[in-house]
Image (tube, rainbow, N blue to C red):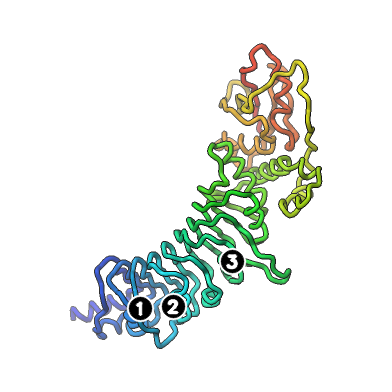
Amino acid sequence: KQYSDYVLDLSSLIRIDLSCQWVNEFDDNHQIYKNLNQIKELNIRQNLITNWSQLWIILETYFPRLEIINVSNSRMKLDLNPSNEFIFLKEFILIDTDNDCDLYENIFKYFPNLINIHLDLNRLSFISEIFVERIKNLTNLSLSDNPTLIHWDPFINRLGILKHLQELIINNCGIETIKLINQDDSIELFPSLKYLYMSDNKICLYSSINELSRIKSLMSFSILRNPIYGLNQIENETAKQMIIARLPNLTHLNRVSISRDERRGAEIDYLQSYAQDYFDKKLDFINEHRQYQLLIEKHGEPLKPIVNQQSKKGLCIRSDLLKVIFELGDENETKIEKKIPSSMTIAKLKTFVRRLFSSQLTNDIQFNLFVVIDKKHKELISNDYQDIQFYLGNYCLNDNIDRPSIIRIEII
């Protein structure tokens, strides 16, 4: 009776975790295994299984309907090929198994229905066309912490033909540039890719971000700890705005949601930042800024910069950082003092203000900004393309140029 109760319990199991248990083989107690045919997930990472032939026995004999298997942190020798394909297996986790692509292309041909693969912390130095052919049904692929992978082209580009690939994780792979190959118009690379994670790489140029604008389905992108970001908060914020503006369909950057105001501010700031090149009609401008014309159609043409403007007598020379007191409501309500770049556009300033008063200025609340001239006068800050210096410059002529300007926020 006790044994029959035990067997009944076994038949209800769907997941077995034997990780870090010093397992070196599975015995042949068929009385137990016949009650485990329903098992869907098996975790045998960091054990003592040394040959792939042992894994084939486990899959063929004991768990024939397995869907997920984890054999990470193992060192297995490919000594024998299996006799059958494993059509039920959908997820294969092979983190830290110390192999390159040639072994995996040999293994995956026996798993025709894989949709999720983890190959992090291995010795991947290339991705072959054969490997890609073996995983044509894949939706999720993680290749992080393979610092010898390095080259987007041709290796990452080869993954672009995977029609169902939705998530690609390639953190810390030593990648320096992103360059999508020029395909025939009828062939779209990464047609289903929604999530791309590339933190801890070596991306330093916006030309790489421009390339990603060709991936129309991309919604979430992470690029933390890449040299494209600066050394201080202002440079980091600028880089963030430039990335958002270049990727029109992005809804999340570094796993943080992009608000409507933030996108508008980023796009206008981007338009104004490159306005001089646009008006100069520089060669290759459109190729380098694929979204620029579309953003002009969306927001209007940027202001034409004044070139070689001479300093006018009597005007004070201000620091690049302006001291500003932000007042929410009238002068008796909430006040916060900040230093902001004089070149910050009004569109970006509005995003900055919403973050500064995040609890009061939620996304559904509209507001106007005013420069306070004196107790009786104020000027509406209305042109999103202008920089803050344009509005504050008239009020720097005073006995104390370090006195902060006042910007008042009024909820509509």
N-terminal-most mark, 2 or 1: 1
What residue type is disc 2 on?
Answer: Ile
Name the residue at 67% across, 60% down: 214
Q: CA distance from mark 2 to mark 1?
A: 9 Å
The circle on residue 107 is: 2
SS for callout 1: helix
Closer-to-camera residue (245/171): 171
Question: How many neighbours does mark 3 have within 10 angstroms: few (below 14), some (14-19), or many (20 or more)?
Answer: some
Residue 299 occupies which quadrant of the picture? top right
Q: Are marks 1 and 3 in contact (CB under 8 Å)?
A: no
Where is residue 202? Give x, y as percent. 53, 52
Name the residue at 50% across, 47% down: 225
Please state if 351 lies on the left or on the right of 123 as rendered. right
Q: Residue furthest left?
A: 2
Name the residue at 73% across, 21% down: 394
Kindly tell me whether residue 137 is visible in this rendering: no
SS for callout 3: helix
Q: Are marks 2 and 1 in contact (CB under 8 Å)?
A: yes
Name the residue at 38% across, 68% down: 97
Where is residue 289? Give x, y as percent. 72, 51
What residue type is disc 1 on?
Answer: Trp
N-terminal-most mark, 1 or 3: 1
Mark 3 sits on what residue? 154
The circle on residue 24 is: none
Kindly tell me whether residue 235 is visible in this rendering: yes
Mark 1 sits on what residue? 52
